[in-house]
Image (cartoon, rainbow, N blue to C red):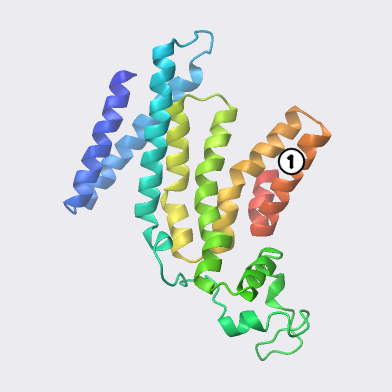
C-alpha cells in the first residue's frame, strides 16, 4: 500500500511536469496510470476492516493529511476556475445575462408574461424556478449580474461539489485518503469543468447537489424517521429545482 501511495504521488508530479512542458500526450498516459493505481488502492481500502483502532500518531497524521488534502483541493479549484474568483463578467455559453435595467423592471410587469417582445409566451422566470426568482430579486436589490450569477450558481456549485463528495464518502467510513481523492476527483474532473465552461449553470448546481440528495435518499431507506424524511425531501427538492434529470437519476 505504501508503494501504491508513492506511485500516485510520483505520477502527480510527473503529470504536472509534463503539462508545464506541454507534453500533453505523455500527461494523458500518466493520468491513466494514476487512475488505475487510485482504484487499485481504493479497492484494498474498502476491504480493510475497522477492527484495529489507530493509535494517536496515526490519528494525528490523518488530521494533517485531511488539512493538506483540502488545501490542495482548494488551490487546485481556484486555479482551475480562476475567472470565477476574479472580478469581471461571467457570461459565456448558456449562462444567463440580465441587464441592470431589466433587474429594475423585474416587478414592474405581470410575471406571467414574457417582456422581451413575445407577448403571451410563458415567462422565463419559470426556468429553474425558484432559483431564477432569487436571481432576479438579488439584481432588483442592486447587485450586478456578475455578482449574482456567482452567488446563486457558480460558487455554490463548486463548493457543494467538494463538500457533498466528502460527506458521501465519509458516510461509508472510507479512509482520509479515499475521502480526499473522492472530493478532488468529483470537483475537478473534465465533465464538471466543461459544465462550468459551457455556462450550464443549472446542471452545474445539480452536479454539486447530487451526492447530498443521493445520500439523503440512502439514509431514508436505512432509517425511516420524520426528521430524515424532511432532510431527504429538502435536499431532493433542491436537486429537482436545479436539474430534474439529475433528480430522476438519483431516484433510479
Judged left or right of residue 45, residue 149 is right
Q: Nearer the viewer, residue 140 or 13?
A: 140
- In which quadrant will I find the N terminus? top left
Residue drawn at (31%, 19%), measured in percent from left and top? Answer: 2
Q: Which residue, given by chain and number where applicable, does mark 1 sit on?
A: 231
- Residue 197: horizontal and vertical position, in percent? 43, 63
Horizontally, residue 92 falls left or right of residue 102, namely left
Residue lying furthest front in this view?
A: 142
Instruction: Please state if 76 lies on the left or on the right of 227 as rendered.
Output: left
Q: Position of residue 135 (x, y in %)?
A: 63, 68
> With 85 as the anchor, is 7 left or right in this view?
left
Quadrant hosting residue 57: top left
Q: In the image, residue 43 lies at what x, y percent? A: 45, 24
Q: Residue furthest left?
A: 21
Labels in figure, total: 1
Secondary element under disc 1, as helix, strand or loop, is helix
Q: Is residue 1 above or below residue 181?
A: above
Task: Name the residue: 40% across, 50% down.
Answer: 77
Which part of the image, by quadrant, shows the C terminus?
top right
Please say whether residue 252 is visible from this viewpoint: no
Residue 247 in view: yes
- Seen in the picture, residue 106 relative to 165 is either above or below; the reply is below
Which residue is the extreme one toward the right? 226
In the image, 141 versus 154, the foreground residue is: 141
Q: Few, some or many C-alpha atoms within 10 Å of disc 1 (few <14, some 14-19, many ≥20)?
A: some
Q: Position of residue 201 (x, y in %)?
A: 55, 63
Q: Name the residue at 46% across, 47% down.
A: 187
Query: As displayed, is residue 142 above or below residue 169?
Result: below
Closer to the camera in the image, 228 or 119: 228
Tell me what residue is drawn at x 41 percent, y 67 percent: 87
Amino acid at each position: 500500500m505504501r508503494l501504491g501511495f508513492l506511485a500516485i504521488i510520483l505520477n502527480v508530479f510527473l503529470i504536472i511536469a509534463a503539462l508545464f512542458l506541454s507534453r500533453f500526450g505523455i500527461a494523458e498516459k500518466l493520468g491513466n496510470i494514476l487512475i488505475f493505481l487510485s482504484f487499485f488502492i481504493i479497492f484494498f481500502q474498502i476491504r480493510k476492516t475497522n477492527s484495529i483502532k489507530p493509535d494517536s500518531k496515526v490519528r494525528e497524521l490523518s488530521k494533517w493529511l485531511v488539512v493538506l488534502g483540502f488545501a490542495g483541493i482548494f488551490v487546485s479549484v481556484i486555479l482551475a476556475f480562476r475567472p470565477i474568483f476574479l472580478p469581471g463578467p461571467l457570461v459565456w455559453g448558456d449562462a444567463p445575462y440580465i441587464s441592470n435595467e431589466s433587474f429594475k423592471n423585474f416587478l414592474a410587469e405581470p410575471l406571467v408574461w414574457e417582456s422581451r417582445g413575445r407577448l403571451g409566451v410563458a415567462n422565463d422566470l419559470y426556468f429553474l424556478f425558484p432559483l431564477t426568482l432569487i436571481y432576479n430579486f438579488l439584481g432588483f436589490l442592486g447587485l450586478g449580474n456578475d455578482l449574482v450569477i456567482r452567488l446563486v450558481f457558480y460558487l455554490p456549485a463548486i463548493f457543494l461539489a467538494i463538500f457533498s463528495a466528502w460527506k458521501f464518502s465519509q458516510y461509508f467510513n472510507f479512509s482520509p485518503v479515499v475521502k480526499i481523492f473522492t472530493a478532488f476527483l468529483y470537483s475537478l474532473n473534465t465533465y464538471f469543468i466543461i459544465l462550468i465552461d459551457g455556462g450550464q449553470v443549472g446542471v452545474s448546481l445539480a452536479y454539486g447537489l447530487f451526492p447530498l440528495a443521493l445520500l439523503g435518499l440512502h439514509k431514508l431507506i436505512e432509517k425511516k424517521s420524520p426528521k430524515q424524511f424532511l432532510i431527504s425531501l429538502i435536499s431532493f427538492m433542491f436537486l429537482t429545482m436545479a436539474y430534474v434529470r439529475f433528480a430522476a437519476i438519483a431516484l433510479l
